[in-house]
Image (cartoon, grey):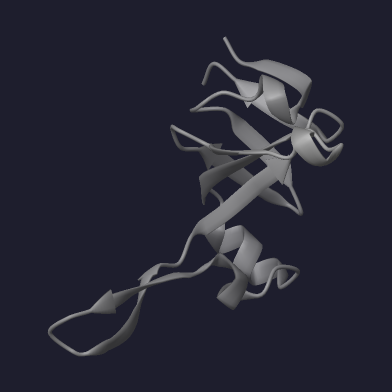
């Protein structure tokens, strides 16, 4: 059964489906956590995710395709190549809230 939740960034989990900018982003395991508390900030989470409705997002034109790409260095070609075309990062602290589907 799918739950529809409103969660802050600290409550997100791998496998959650986060809705943002018309995208449905499936969170991958192991977010990057940046500790900014020493300077008066908070913990900041950066979750890599895969856009599950990529065709729809590209057709809408709201998110530029280049924003969804990652690159890697190809040793054989001796140049940067596009690695993925469906990536998005969900980032924020305990104040950022997200519409989330969980359990599907």
Q: Position of residue 64 (x, y in %)?
A: 66, 75
Look at 58% across and 55% down and name the residue there. 88
Residue farthest left in this picture: 76
Q: Is residue 69 left or right of residue 91?
A: left
Look at 43% across and 32% down and name the residue there. 29
Q: Is residue 103 visible?
A: yes
Q: Is residue 75 above or below residue 17?
A: below
Closest to the observer, 40 or 103: 40
Q: Is residue 78 above or below residue 91?
A: below
Closest to the observer, 56 or 97: 97
Closest to the observer, 36 or 92: 36
The quarter of the picture where residue 40 lies is: top right
Closest to the observer, 6 or 32: 32
Look at 82% across and 41% down and name the residue there. 39
Q: Is residue 92 above or below residue 59?
A: above
Look at 80% across and 28% down and name the residue there. 94
Q: Position of residue 78 (x, y in %)?
A: 21, 90
Quadrant of the image for the N terminus? top right
Q: Is residue 51 visible?
A: no
Q: Is residue 20 above or below residue 86?
A: above
Q: Position of residue 65 (x, y in %)?
A: 58, 74
Q: Is residue 6 left or right of residue 74?
A: right
The quarter of the picture where residue 61 lies is: bottom right
């Amino acid at each position: 059964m799918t739950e529809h939740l409103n969660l802050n960034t600290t409550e997100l989990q791998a496998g959650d489906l986060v809705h943002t900018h018309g995208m449905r982003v499936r969170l991958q395991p192991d977010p990057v956590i940046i500790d900014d508390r020493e300077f008066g900030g908070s913990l900041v989470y950066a979750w890599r995710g895969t856009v599950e409705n990529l065709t729809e997002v590209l057709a809408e034109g709201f998110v530029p395709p280049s924003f969804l790409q990652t690159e890697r260095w190809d040793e054989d070609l001796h140049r940067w190549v596009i690695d993925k075309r469906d990536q998005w990062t969900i980032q924020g602290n305990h104040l950022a809230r997200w519409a989330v589907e969980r359990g599907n």
